[in-house]
Image: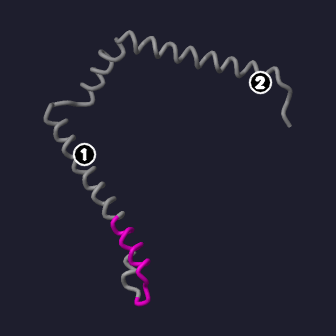
Amino acid sequence: AIVTFQKKDASGGDYFVGFIVLIAALGFVLSALADFYMLTKIHGLYRATGASMAKAQQEFTTNVLSNEGVRSAAAQAAAASVRSNFAGQNQQQQQGPRY
């Protein structure tokens, strides 16, 4: 994009495309800076509360895994997975070899 502005024989369309590319690059840079700012801000808030990975894991095991809805959904998903695997194996055994 910068090369476009340095060319002597560049037309108006070249300048326009170069300008659009520079605007897009500037947008990505601003987005990356905003992401970094938010990450540091959230990390600071997280650390200020005295939180730790051990506390988060303990909270997860006591709150999420003790929830009956979560446990039943996990059990249903596991049962469906096992059923589909057995059904897939039976179909493969009944079919002849594929060459």
Near-viewer residue (22 or 69): 22
Residue matched to label 1: 39
Residue at point 46%, 15% (across, down): 73
- Placement of 46 over or under 36, stated as above or below: above
Give the prevailing secondary structure in the magenta stretch.
helix
Colour treatment of the image: one colour
Helix, strand or loop status at disc 2: helix
Q: Residues within 10 Å of mark 2 (few under 14, many from 20)?
A: few
Residue 54 falls within the magenta-colored stretch: no
On the image, the x and y values in percent for residue 27 come to: 31, 60
* Type of amino acid at the residue the image marks with label 1: Leu
Q: Residue at x 40, y 90 (%)?
A: 8
Where does the image place residue 41, in percent across and percent down from the top left?
18, 44
Q: Which segment is the magenta one?
A: 8-23
Could you say which quadrant of the image residue 10 lies in?
bottom left
Residue 97 at x, y percent in the picture: 85, 30
**Residue that extends furthest to the left in the rendered view of this protein:** 48
Q: Residue at x 86, y 37 (%)?
A: 99
Horizontally, residue 80 falls left or right of residue 93, namely left
Please check the rendered image and state whether residue 15 is part of the magenta-colored stretch, yes or no: yes
Q: How many marks?
A: 2
Q: Is 80 on the left or on the right of 86, as rendered?
A: left
Q: Secondary structure at mark 1?
A: helix
Identify the residue position indicated by label 2 in the image: 92
Residue type highlighted by circle 2: Gln
Real-space Cα distance between discs 1 and 2? 49 Å
